[in-house]
Image (spheres, coloured by chain):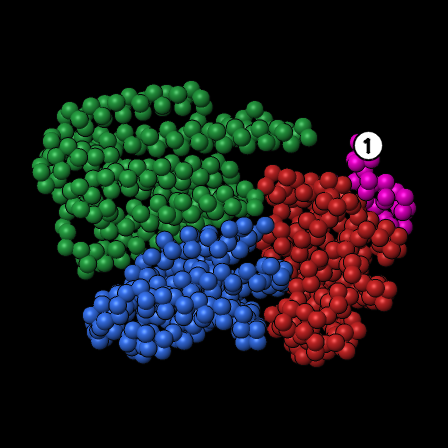
Amino acid sequence: MRNYLRGALAIYAKDIRLEARTKETISAVLAFAIIIAFIFGFAFDPSPTIVAVVGPGIVWVAYVFTGILGMNRTFALERDRGTLDGLLLAPVSHESVYAGKLASTATIMLVVEAALFPVFLVLFDLNLFNVWFVLVALAATIGFATVGTLFSAIAVHTRAREVLLPLLFLPIVLPVIIGAVSGTDAAIAGDGWDGVGKWLQFIVAFDAVFLMLSSWAFDFVLEE
Amino acid sequence: MTTHDFNPAPGAQLALEVAGLSKAFGGTPALRDVDLQLGWGEALALFGHNGAGKSTLIRTLVTLVRPDEGTVTIAGFDRVRQAAQVRSMVGYVGHQSLLYDDMTARENLRFYAKLYGIADADHRVERSLAEVGATSFANRRTRVLSNGMVKRVAIARALLHRPRVLLLDEPETGLDQGGLELLDSMVTAVKAGGASVVMSTHATERGLALADHVLVLDAGRVALAGAAANTSVGEVQRAVLGTRQAAS
Amino acid sequence: MPSAAGPRSRAMGLGGRQLLLGVAALVFIIDLVLIFGYAPTASEALGVQVQRIFYFHVPSAIVGMISFGVSAFGSVMYLIKRTRKWDRLAWASAEAGTIIFTVAIATGAIWAKPVWQTWWVWDANGTLTFMLWLVFIGYLITRAYAPTVDRGARWAAVVAIFGAAAVPFVYMAADWWAGLHTERVTGPGASGSLESEMFYTLIFSLVAFGFLFAVLVAERSAQRAIDEQVEILRREVA
């Protein structure tokens, strides 16, 4: 167990340090996210009634697509520069490598999601500064990162990595998307635990199952 | 190199024991029924033309490639069932440096020290840097270092956790004379410390000089195996050319 | 030296496959007779003659889901046992399932548009059908883009297993979502109450599609087994 945590923590710290230094992933993903938000702003009339209906959907379309962009980079950089082998050679279980990568991917996604709060507020008068929304976003992002990190390990070894990741990823996380949109809807409407609770539990259950599954499958996926 | 961080399996007589190792990638065989044994404190020179299976053999030993058939035991640990322990026993220098471009040499080594759970990491990192002569450029990002400098740091990375078996895949590439001398002295020091070395190389004379055993691979099969003292450069070169010469 | 009892012997022999094909063809002909002759003509509300497509849509959707189960099961066994036969089963089931799901989706759309003025009903069944179809396509594309067949087999097995694990979540989420957002009670996916002729025709159609699945899987598996044996022999000669 100590080995597991040590490995995951070392990889997480390294990823965050590198990202803080180069800002490679965050800048690309953030730019993309803001562009998406602006496009939505022009795609329809952001009157309060319409925003109330499509707002949650827009938020999650933006989050999912920027998430895909971010997740692709998780292993792309390691693999292209050959450092993935370095991680796999460490005397820690490969589950531990997965955990570290999952944590850094999720962290970057959460930072970008938080950065979009003011953007959504300004463009759509959509107030996401809401405890329940934050909980839903946290649970959903972990769900996305869990499955996405695993499939990214597959996609990055193929010629079609940009296409393969969303294709594999989206059908599997469909329940999380549905849960996130519904939970967001309830959170913004001010429903509190009564409205949000069911969806939150659902997403957390998904996270638990797929965390275990992905952790186990990681080794299989990387085997040569 | 005196103290080790990790210990071999109790009662492990040999550093390496490989029997009947076979591996095919998508139908193309890379290794066919390879046997080899290596004792503690010994060095094995691995020869073969490009594509003969040298890299595959080394990568199988360091757990990056999974064997299709055969048994592989490293420091008494089974390669398949005890992979994490095997990784604690081996140090690997391959074609890629395994270093992060945007981190300094020192930061890279500190990361690996943490990953390997090395106690007193900072001190060990400084010693490793000194051993490979990299202290002067330790604070520069890997991106700006020359190939030779990168290779030195890569060697330091491999030796950081005091492995019992050091595996080098054509380590002479990119090294200048100073680097080559450093490599020779490190191999000698590793052997003196009781650890073993496997080195694949195209430099036949140098390889024979450093090694106790020789293994030549040809299209995945063992073409020649024996003691280095009893093997001449000519024999090795003929074995390397092997089937290709017979075909011409 | 591979024995005569190589991979080919673990797939169905030619004689067996021809018999299966013959039986399947017979069952299908009888099925068509039942659908157009025996099954009652439907009401206005369900589309009169167009409703007969129900006997293609529902069985194909069900058999599609069965094929997913087979593929997922084959994938699990392959990851445990690592023998070719399980991978061949999983792969052939994925291919057959993709075709059968495509039939289900196409027939569902053809039926839904004139009768319910929508191309697809996103209830629990409908969403699940669509999602599994996408997972199958992902499975096949993963194999197509994998650098070697072995890695493709392992990755695709993981994809199938993940798809299977997601099924209960997709079903629940889609069910709740449909409950919140659609007023429609019946749709192409709903069964409602069936008269006995409709029921028997449906069951027979289900059997017919089951045979279709079996024929496709048997043929594809045997073809791959032969390909693999050829490859082994070719390497021996080289």
Say whether residue A52 is left or right of residue C184: right
Residue B69 visible? The answer is: no
Where is residue C92, by image quadrant? top left
What residue did someone put label 1 on? B248
Give, as a three-letter code, the residue at label 1.
Answer: Ser
Identified at 64% across, 43% down, the residue is: B23
Pick whichever, B100 or C170, lies toward us: B100
- Tell me the chain of label 1: B
Indicate the position of residue A116 as horizontal and vertical percent values.
38, 74
**Left-right relation of B41 to B10:** right
- Which percent across, then down, holds residue C197? 13, 30
- Would residue B70 be counted in the magenta stretch? no
A153 sits left or right of B84 in the view: left
Camera-nearest residue between B222 and C174: C174
Magenta part of the chain: B221-248
What colour is chain C?
green
Q: Which chain is blue?
A: A
Q: Colour of chain B?
A: red
SS at mark 1? loop
Identify the residue at horizontal 87%, vertical 55% (top origin).
B206
Residue in view at x 39 percent, y 21 percent: C18
Q: Position of residue B103 (x, y in %)?
A: 64, 73
Q: Nearer the viewer, residue B199 or B196?
A: B199
> Alpha-carbon neighbours of circle 1 within 10 Å: few (<14), some, or many (≥20)?
few
Task: Please state if A187 lies on the left or on the right of B190 as rendered.
Answer: left
